[in-house]
Amino acid sequence: MPDEQIRLRLWRTTTPQRERGAFVETSVRADRAVDSVLDVIERVWAEVDPTLVFRHACHHASCGTCAVRVNGRERLPCITALSDVWDGHSTLTIEPLRNVPLIADLAVDPTLQLDQLAALRFPYVRTVEESVRCATGIARDADVGTAERFEDCLECLACVSACPVASGSPEYLGPAVLAAAQRIAEEPRHGDVERVLDLVDTDHGVWQCRSVWACSAVCPSGVDPGARIMDLRRRLLRRRPMAVGAPA
Amino acid sequence: MAAPQAVTVRSPGLLRRLAYWLEPRWRDPGWLAFALNRLTGHILVLYLILHLVVLSQLLDGPSGWDRLLGIFGSRPFLVGDVLLIAAVVFHGLNGLRVAALTFGYGARHTTALIVVVLVVSTVLSALAGWAILT
Amino acid sequence: MSEQVQPGRRFLGRPDAVEPGYVPPASDTSSRAGLGAGARSRAGRLWLLQALTGAMLVGVLAVHLVAQHFLAPDGLRDYANVVDYLRQPLAAVIEVMLLGSVIVHVCLGLRSSLVDVLGEAALRRVSIGLAFAGIVAIGYGLWLIIALLTAPA
């Protein structure tokens, strides 16, 4: 039975206009030994104010739906242990993601970025032999690298929120989309690599990354979008004018 | 699946965009390097413009140019020179670090490399300051 | 729910600046006119040029700073000294390389700052303006160097 009280500063808006929002303070009971941050948010909703708007689904970091900013840092609250971010005395600040359109309170609308991911025609259905081989422990060490799979991306958009370039430039494709594009280039399966490379080879594509590396720092799934964007650049720089044998 | 489509982009104002871009994000060392790189870059652009304008005095021959040397040799200008050298050294070293990232070097050690860039720039600037001011 | 509503700092995050469904246009193939399919895009070529001029600057700017200031008596060359220095062929070549690389690097650097804050149409106009300013600056610098080289000793 939780016996501590946690003070929270929650961002609240009733409209999608962030400028109209403000921090609201409240407190709920909490148990640092077992609670996740999402448990605390849900307790606010269940015990304090049922009108609090937030998104969540799986509770175990497989859907990427619940990402918010906790004390200014992008996190998946479902897998963020309360003890990692709260010392028992301070006020915990929870805000919605940046750079993603807001619905209300902590909930953002990922449609824009998900549409952009869809525009890559990302092949969701893939064979999994190599990951299965790794998971069952029969892979040699040398195989582990090739079985590292981008499908680790939860599309939670924490990287987009952390990126300072995405804040100032709505046209920027952003780390999530660019990392997905790199995965298609790296392992095409049935994806059209040339088409994807054309899509990202723009002023607002891979060339707008300023190598801040905030995306890689906050990714809850180890996707490392920063390094993947650099890999895309190398692929694009290897494109040669009038390459011999290039498809017409 | 949504097909790519042309949609009007409603742009926030220029000042507002700059405000987002300059918002401090101290937890990311990369942000500090990025912000310093932009800051030093823009300072150096302003200096370059001044430098090119001042060099036009060379066209007046010794009378024009040598008169200026006394002003440039004064203490406040020398301190400004040291600051400019610090900006040049940081911008150059950080630029090499960022370019190396694209070619696949340094991605695993960004924070450490930023610290190295900051330390080396400080040491080189201090040495230049010692040489200029003493 | 609230115990108190704080005025709070303004939430600094992107407003809904792009409508749902917006996908940026793919690389403009006209920007690689004559280069054929699979060529580098203009954006990629500009990035590469910025990296190359930056790397070149690290070398030539270091030579410029050391030669013009650290090796000069009292840190600054007087008129006769400047002209003497420039009349060494290697020095003149390095100064011309410095002029070209620094102007190109500055124009591309300003352009990438502007990519981050301007929309597509404004960016195009400003890029043309920057290219023009760069050409004028290089022309001015070359004129200055030639004038000093041909000045009576």
Image (cartoon, rainbow, N blue to C red):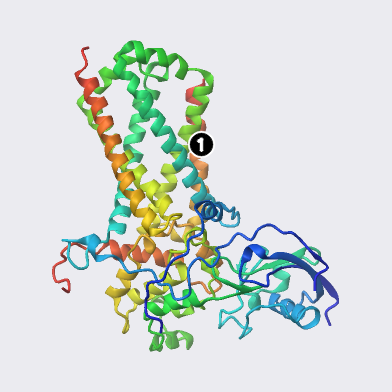
Looking at the picture, does residue B53 appear above or below residue A129? Answer: above
Q: Left or right: where does residue A243 sit relative to residue A84?
A: left
Task: Classify residue A118 by image quadrant.
Answer: bottom left
Identify the residue at horizontal 57%, vertical 66% (top origin).
Answer: A98
Q: Secondary structure at mark 1?
A: helix
A201 lies above or below A191: above
Q: Position of residue C48 (x, y in %)?
A: 30, 53
- Report the amino acid beneath label 1: Val
Q: Nearer the viewer, residue B132 or A123?
A: A123
- On the question of residue C54 being in view, the answer is no
On screen, B134 above or below A119?
Answer: above
Q: Left of A50 or right of it: where is B118?
A: left
Q: x, y percentage for residue B60?
A: 31, 15
Query: In x, y percent, where is residue A88?
Result: 80, 67
Which residue is depicted at the point 22% across and 31% down? Answer: C93
Question: Residue at the location (35% across, 29% down)?
Answer: B52
Residue that label 1 marks: B123
How dense is the environment of label 1, judged by Cα within 10 Å: few (below 14), some, or many (20 and up)? Answer: few
> Horizontal and vertical percent for residue C128?
30, 48
